[in-house]
């Protein structure tokens, strides 16, 4: 029964990207709003510039309650370790403006991060600024920028949200490893899978 409910929730929450009022970064484009400070769950205000390391930075759109996030987020810490190993920064951002008074409030974010043992930045994307500028579609949706802050990969974390042990293509990790070794990223874009970002649209 639980599995049926979970599948139904996923079907209902698969995103259809609303492009109205949003931008969309293409591979090769430079990141924007990298100096904008965002409130992290630690109470610190950080920006993409602050988080970026020599070989680049991951900007991962996420949230607290999406069923897809709940299946993928146990891989976030491993992803952070992988990024550190390859001298790449990482920030997870919550752009769910329309749920800021509920499931995705700052207080709920802090509680969620503590419960899940987040050991990486988890920050508020106020007014969905980054999501709208980058073209973030789903939670999760990964954007990887190189050391010059040019987009080299966007899309899914890997090809299996249901089981980490059954992943055949670790898209994001492979792209990060390429940056770490100075190689070209082989797969630069995949289709994101997740819940629609409850963004602010002007």
Image (cartoon, grey):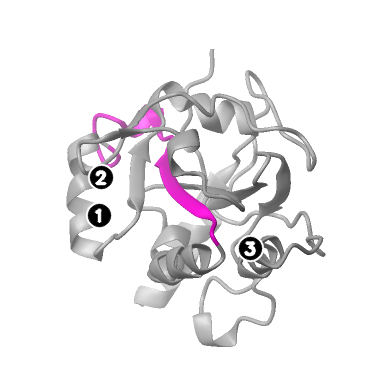
Looking at the image, residue 125 lies above or below residue 108:
above
Camera-side residue: 195 or 78? 78
Q: Residue at x 76, y 34 (%)?
A: 29
Q: Are marks 2 and 1 in contact (CB under 8 Å)?
A: yes
Q: Between marks 2 and 1, how big is the CA–CA gap? A: 6 Å
The magenta stretch spans residue 101 = yes
Mark seen at residue 69: none
- Mark 3 sits on what residue? 176
Whether residue 64 is visible, yes or no, is yes
Residue 143 on image: x %, y %: 62, 47
Camera-side residue: 187 or 190? 187
- Could you say whether the residue bearing mark 3 is in a helix, strand or loop? helix
The magenta stretch spans residue 61 = no
Mark 1 or mark 3, earlier in chain: 1
Residue 201 on image: x %, y %: 53, 19
Q: Is residue 114 left or right of residue 78?
A: left
- Could you say whether the residue bearing mark 1 is in a helix, strand or loop? helix
Whether residue 5 is visible, yes or no, is no
Q: Is residue 199 left or right of residue 46?
A: right
Looking at the image, residue 6 lies above or below residue 27:
below
Q: Residue at x 61, y 81 (%)?
A: 167
Q: Which residues are magenta?
A: 87-104
- Mark 1 sits on what residue? 113
Residue 92 on image: x %, y %: 43, 48
Q: Is residue 178 left or right of residue 70?
A: right
Mark seen at residue 109: 2
Q: Quadrant of residue 36?
A: top left
Camera-side residue: 108 or 79? 79
Image quadrant holding the N terminus, namely: bottom left
Image quadrant holding the C terminus, namely: top right
């Amino acid at each position: 029964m639980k599995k049926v409910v979970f599948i139904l929730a996923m079907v209902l929450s698969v995103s259809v990207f609303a492009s109205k009022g949003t931008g969309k970064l293409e591979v090769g484009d430079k990141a924007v709003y990298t100096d904008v400070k965002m409130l992290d769950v630690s109470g610190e205000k950080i920006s993409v510039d602050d988080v970026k390391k020599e070989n680049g930075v991951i900007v991962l759109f996420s949230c607290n309650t999406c069923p897809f996030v709940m299946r993928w987020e146990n891989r976030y810490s491993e992803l952070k370790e992988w990024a550190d190993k390859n001298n790449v920064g990482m920030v997870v951002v919550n752009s769910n403006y329309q749920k800021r008074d509920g499931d995705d409030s700052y207080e709920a974010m802090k509680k969620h991060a503590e419960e899940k043992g987040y050991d990486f930045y988890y920050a508020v994307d106020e007014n969905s600024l980054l999501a709208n500028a980058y073209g973030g579609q789903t939670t999760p949706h990964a954007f990887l920028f190189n050391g010059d802050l040019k987009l080299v990969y966007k899309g899914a974390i890997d090809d299996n949200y249901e089981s980490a042990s059954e992943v055949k293509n670790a898209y994001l990790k492979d792209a990060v490893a390429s940056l770490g070794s100075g190689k070209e990223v082989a797969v630069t874009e995949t289709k994101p899978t997740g819940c629609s970002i409850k963004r602010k649209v002007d």
